[in-house]
Amino acid sequence: MCIFIIVTNLINIRLSLTHNTGNDQSTSIDNKSDGYYVLPEECPIRNVSLAETPFPKTALASYPGSGNTWTRHLIQQATGFATGSVYCDSRLFPSFKTGECVFDGRAIVVKTHRWGEKTRSRYQKAVLIVRHPARAVLSLFNLMRAGFNKHTNYTAFNESGWHTFADREMKKWKNFTEDWLSNYTRKMHVIIYEHLKENPRQTLENLLKFLALKYSQRDLDCAIWNQNGRYHRHFALEPDLSKLYSLRQQLEINAYVANISRILRERYAIEWKFNNPWN
Ligand SMILES: *[C@@H]1O[C@H](CO)[C@@H](O)[C@H](O)[C@H]1NC(C)=O
Ligand SMILES: *[C@@H]1O[C@H](CO)[C@@H](O)[C@H](O)[C@H]1NC(C)=O
Ligand SMILES: *[C@@H]1O[C@H](CO)[C@@H](O)[C@H](O)[C@H]1NC(C)=O
Ligand SMILES: *[C@@H]1O[C@H](CO)[C@@H](O)[C@H](O)[C@H]1NC(C)=O
Ligand SMILES: *[C@@H]1O[C@H](CO)[C@@H](O)[C@H](O)[C@H]1NC(C)=O
Ligand SMILES: *[C@@H]1O[C@H](CO)[C@@H](O)[C@H](O)[C@H]1NC(C)=O
Ligand SMILES: *[C@@H]1O[C@H](CO)[C@@H](O)[C@H](O)[C@H]1NC(C)=O
């Protein structure tokens, strides 16, 4: 996984001759120039700051375990603007401290795992991240408990309260995702986590366009270079999800995913691609 990312970056990354680190709020894209490569040491972790002129208040909404922190990191590294959060998590890395607990337009986007009318109505724009619930729910469980992995003892997993947790959380995933997709009436941009993983550069660029932010090709390259940036948790190898979820749970998840896929296709023209978790 890590090796794959590094190799594709070496192939893809080119340094634009004219780089633009300005931060005004219009969109501008430099053209790529061949023959230059950004080296990791040319991409230091950027310090970020809150905006002096407020942005439209924009949600970065996701069910937990769906890459919210990773996305914040990418935005921050590409733009130098701090992202915010409705939460106040003091354990986060320094670059997130600037925006933690900031939930107004000084932050370019505001992280939230909440849903419902009261939450939705607070934001003038929204970015929604969608990840397959089989993996998002497991990721949340892992975050809250010990790290289960490829070598998971499935019997012990069964006895850990996992099934009760999964039953409740997959319904939350459905409620959360349906509510934002069906009931939010203002401008919304949807990020599919699986597409972000597959093609982070293009996914990030589309997001920055939606946010009407200025960036250069170099900014994108460096944000991608720094993408693992100590924040991105991932399994070396995925555990066997068909053993972690009971057959009944698998069928329920499939039904939720089918419905969300349909909404994404019909209302957002997005074809959600993911690896079948039960293989
Ligand atoms: C970038 O390339 C496109 C298409 O080749 C061209 O239309 C555009 O003017 C170029 N932009 C700059 C800033 O050079
Ligand atoms: C970030 O800020 C620290 C402390 O002010 C400074 O030492 C460091 O060089 C800055 N990093 C960048 C990339 O500007
Ligand atoms: C969202 O809309 C659906 C119908 O699409 C409705 O059933 C549901 O109650 C709404 N949720 C909220 C929190 O308003
Ligand atoms: C785990 O629990 C599920 C559902 O309760 C059951 O079908 C499965 O056989 C159990 N697996 C193990 C390894 O205990
Ligand atoms: C797996 O966990 C069960 C229940 O906690 C335990 O009895 C069993 O010895 C464990 N198996 C292994 C291979 O560690
Ligand atoms: C999901 O929404 C339904 C219908 O509004 C509600 O009855 C249920 O309690 C919600 N479940 C969770 C886990 O949020
Ligand atoms: C999927 O959508 C259909 C039509 O809107 C609805 O009748 C069905 O209950 C939904 N299924 C699930 C699992 O949410």
Image: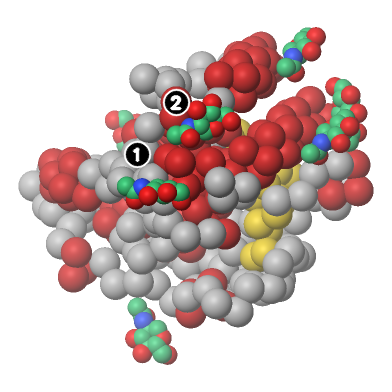
Between 191 and 42, the one lying in front of the other is 191
Rendering quarter of residue 88: bottom right
Q: Quadrant of ligand 6?
A: top right
| Circle 1 residues within 10 Å: few <14, some 14–19, many ≥20 | few
Q: Residue at x 66, y 44 (%)?
A: 165
CA neighbours of label 2 inside 10 A, class few (<14), some (14 to 19), many (20+): some
- Foreground: 7 or 172? 172
Q: Position of residue 30 (x, y in %)?
A: 34, 47
Coordinates of residue 236 in the picture (x, y in percent): 28, 48
Q: Residue at x 44, y 26 (%)?
A: 242
Along the viewing direction, whichever of 167 and 86 lies nearer the viewer: 167
Amino acid at pointer 1? Glu
Residue 271 relative to residue 12: left or right: right
| Residue 255 place in picture, x, y as percent | 65, 15
Inspect this view and state whether residue 83 appears: yes
Q: Secondary structure at mark 1?
A: loop
Nearest the eye: 134 or 112: 134
Q: Which quadrant does the C terminus fall into?
A: top left
Q: Residue at x 29, y 72 (%)?
A: 44
- Could one spot residue 215 in this view of the protein? no
Which residue is under mark 2? 242
Q: Is residue 42 left or right of residue 23?
A: left
Residue at horizontal 50%, vertical 53%? Answer: 142
Image quadrant where one finds the N terminus: top left
Q: Which residue is mark 1?
A: 238
**Separation of marks 2 and 1 at Cα, in angstroms:** 11 Å
